[in-house]
Amino acid sequence: MTHLDDQVAVGGLRLRNRLYRAPLLECAGTGPDTAETLRDELEPAAAAGAGLVCQGATIVRGEGGCAAPGMTRVHDDDFVAGLSPVPEAIEAHGGRVFAQLEHGGLRSMEVWHAGYRDAHPDLDQLAVSRPPLPLRAADRLGLLDVSPRVLSTDDVYELAADFGRAAGRLADAGYHGIHVAGANMGIVQQFLSPFYNRRSDEFADGFRFLELVAEEVRQRTDLSLVTKIPAETRAPPGIRRHLTADDCVRLCERAVEDAGFDAVAPVSGSVFWDMHVVRGEYPERAWRDDQFQAGYADAFGGRWRAKLVSLANRLQARRATFEPAWNADLCRRVRERVDVPVMLEGGVRERARIDRLLGDACDLVGMGRPFYAEPRLPARLLDNSGASVACENCNNCTVPQAAGADGVCRTPSVLAERGRLAREGAYDTGQV
């Protein structure tokens, strides 16, 4: 039997238990207060008992590549050295912290955020190949602004080196591991996906880029190295070129055997940035909230365009209904084929389900959005075998991030439940 509070090794690093905070957008930016903001966001999870805390997408370059407002960049030596209070705080509570490295490519704000594009008119997007037809059509309709710079072979090598250099800086700052953002429509997924990758050089096999990133990281640090691997099984009807579940399993095998990753997180999603990333209810409260309307208008190029995005979001939600532990079957298949820990996240909400998944579908279990609602959630899950999260999967925490708002829970019923649990001492662990 595998238990949630059992230790587990990821590469050469031993974690005190198998519960982790999955990567989220901390909205910490890149400025003098970034370390303090990150520490405030991440430390409660470690103080409440999480074995691993993953810092959300951090961008490896100084220009472009941010998929949402507020992402942190890790291209500058002095700036990253100043992040050392983050791993120090996590380690003081017995936890460990991994930084997720990312570049958005065709998912970057240069594509979808009208205000950002207006402020950076000369900033083109990095593209694996010529953008696929649906993105070009959206550009012609004025819904996106697609002006790609297709990476040359030399450009690809330089981008991979930027991942490695960022990893080296974070290692020097005291971080305990590196998490390569291989899914959620970032540049790594765009290399892996036949929907995006139509190259004719050595990177026509998109795995070569992920392998090269691992090589660049390993040249600079021996930190534990993990990655997400996508299956694009939720691609819209009519999209024939996409990553199947079988493709994902094979990519996970290659990530372990050929690239030497210490753990993998298989995730199912789409070829687009849509509701299949988060799943759950249409975030009606967030779309109607007056405090975000100006931000939505700035992001999407006007109020009527924001309403169109809201409508598209509503239609997506009909297909992206919430499924408990929606990556479990995929993770189970991968776990049968690899000899490193398999990390499962996506739709895990109850301790009882965690207990059934561990040792069967996965070796570690992570949660994302529930931490917006309960920053000290691990205290309850580790202490109570009958615990379930307060999160209602309403997604009202995520949509305002497009308007530059912080990722926090704003749902009154959830906040009321958190308050009740706090008054009852459910988050008390004896740690400070």
Image (cartoon, helix red, strand yellow):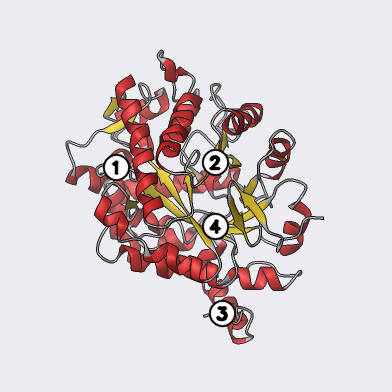
Residue 130 appears left or right of 43: left
Q: Position of residue 69 (x, y in %)?
A: 32, 53
Answer with mark 3 or mark 4, whichever residue precedes in sequence: 4
Q: Is residue 74 above or below residue 128?
A: below
What residue is rendered at 66% in x and 73% in y?
A: 380
Answer with mark 1 or mark 3, whichever residue precedes in sequence: 1
Q: Which residue is mark 2?
A: 228
For the N terminus, the quadrant is bottom right
Disc ID at residue 61: 1
Q: Which residue is mark 3?
A: 431
Where disc 4 sits, the SS reads loop
Toward the viewer: 259 or 304? 259
Alpha-carbon distance for marks 2 and 3?
Answer: 31 Å
Residue 337, picture quadrant: top right
Q: Is residue 257 above or below residue 410?
A: above
Q: Identify residue type, mark 2.
A: Lys
What residue is rendered at 30% in x and 28% in y?
A: 140
Where disc 2 sits, the SS reads strand
Alpha-carbon distance for marks 1 and 4?
Answer: 25 Å
What residue is rendered at 37% in x and 22% in y?
A: 129
Disc ID at residue 368: 4
